[in-house]
Image (spheres, grey):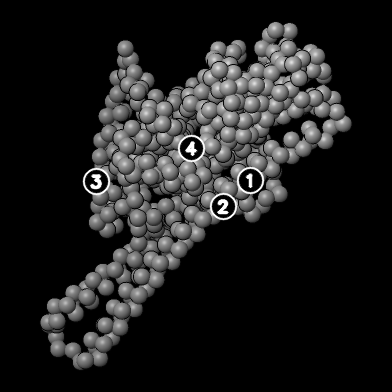
Amino acid sequence: MWLVPFSVLALWLEQAERNKEDLALIERVQRRDEHALAKLYDRYAQLLYTLALRIVSTSEEAEDVLQDVFLQIWNRSNTYLKERGTVYSWVVTLTRNKAIDRVRSKRYKQQSKEVKLDDAAYVAESQTTNPHQAVLLREYQEIVTAAQKRLSNVETKILDLSYYGGYSQTEIAKMLKMPLGTVKTKMRQAILKLRQVVRPSGTER
Amino acid sequence: MKSEHNRYLGLCLPYALGKLSPRHRRFFEKHLSTGCDECNKELAEIYEAMSLIPLTLPAKPVPPHIRHKVMAAIQTGARAGKQVEQQTQKLVSGAPAVQRPWYGYAVVLVSVVLLVSLALYTNSLINRIDSQEQLLASQQQELIALRDDVQKKTELLKVLQAPRIDMVIMNGLEPSPAGYGKIIWDPEKKVAIFQVANLPQTPADKDYQLWVIKNKQPMPAGVFSVRDEKEKESFFKVLALDVASKREIDAFAVTLEPKGGAPQPTGAMYLIGSPSAN
């Protein structure tokens, strides 16, 4: 039997409450309520800007990404589907995809540039978190950081190249000189470990 | 039926990462639109798990002017929309509180038409940009696939250009008698290409694994999978073939193993070929 630590359970409950509030905000955005969009901005802008900056590397581009994301939330909030996850995961996915699209188009413009693993832009950043940062969900960060520490170095590298670099598993296999099957397995294992933060392993299908 | 559905589940992760080819993406989205609970749930959990990744990044302060820019942009849009609404309402009600000259109505009418046209034009521009972005993304995917193909063919050519090459034919066994394999090998550089054809599609939780059997000991030489019809005939670079003569090798074999491969063969054997039989 799988027992959920009480502290984790409390955070999940808090998270569920936050999800409800987010859902109410997005419904208000759908009714063109500017205050609701401002509230969503205040909740998530710092996290989304940090994520965009991690992917695109320059602050100008990260600013553009953040602006595009919130305009998309305002103009196309009806594309959010409740059954595909929370509002939080939707806005994070929007930001990641917009930033990756920029990086990809830039990468194709500079085709001659070989990306090396030790290239500063693609090296995994320190896994430490700043305890004073005003990012929402910071209590959750400790648990996520603990989950990420359970990933092996290779799993972390593969996850970084895929999530922040936007590389395909075939490209990663070539970069790391690994069989494609191994990259796919390690990627899956890394996601499974993170999923245990979202859902305890005892409830796996 | 179950294995067919496992195939859809296997597409959830590459879909969430934006890594499906346009054809596979359409195929998968068609399936999602049927309302498949299991796939939607799987996808939601993958999105949730991935959205935790940025939480560990050291937070960066957002320049304050971005909030202002975002809010100004939406307010401009919202004001234009409200004006259109108000003007339209006035025109529809047809009962202005104050008597206005006829040209006043003309100006209002022209403004409304202009605003509506502007809104429609902006919308069509947004749609065009969206479709161009989608086209670009799909072309990029195709380019990556073509590069892969060229890379594989370059490897094959390198081996075929060697002054001396050895070849070992592999035949299909009971699970797939029509299966066929060929190891083409440059003994001087110790590199080899493995060509494979007619193997059944790999289940989502499995991979095929190639083995070099030397002194009766199997050594892993790479994993591969057959995901669709296109891959029914393909070739792969053999890793870890550190032998200079085919006399050192007892046989090559392919087995079906858990995803990512196994240190020793555990599953059914699909292909076998011995240098002495060639």
Amino acid type at circle 1 is: Leu
Report the residue marked by disc 1. Answer: B146
Q: Are marks 4 and 2 on the same chain?
A: yes
Residue at mark 2 to residue at mark 3: CA–CA distance: 38 Å
Q: Residue furthest front?
A: B178
Q: Quadrant of residue B195?
A: top right
The nearer-to-camera label among 1 and 4 is 1
Q: In this view, does B179 lie to the left or right of A76?
A: right
Question: How many numbered marks have been drawn onto this rendered protein structure?
Answer: 4
> Where residue B213 appears, x then y in whole percent?
69, 13
Give the residue displayed 45% in from the left and 52% down from the top: A66
Circles 3, 4 touching at the beta carbon (< 8 Å)? no
Looking at the image, is mark 4 or mark 2 earlier in the sequence? 4
Q: Which of B33 and B169 is in front in this view?
A: B169
Amino acid type at circle 2 is: Gln
Amino acid type at circle 3 is: Ala
Give the residue displayed 53% in from the left and 28% down from the top: B200
The nearer-to-camera label among 3 and 4 is 4
Report the residue marked by disc 4. Answer: B14
Q: Nearer the viewer, residue A11 or B127?
A: B127
Amino acid type at circle 4 is: Pro
Does residue A169 appear in the picture of this structure?
Answer: yes
Label 3 SS: helix
Give the residue displayed 31% in from the left and 28% down from the top: A11
Q: Is residue A141 left or right of residue A112?
A: left
Q: In this view, does B56 lie to the left or right of B216?
A: left
Report the residue marked by disc 2. Answer: B139
Q: Is residue B130 left or right of residue B193?
A: left
> Where residue B42 appears, x then y in whole percent?
37, 32
Q: Mark 4 lies on which chain?
A: B
The nearer-to-camera label among 3 and 1 is 1
Quadrant in which the C terminus of chain A appears: top left
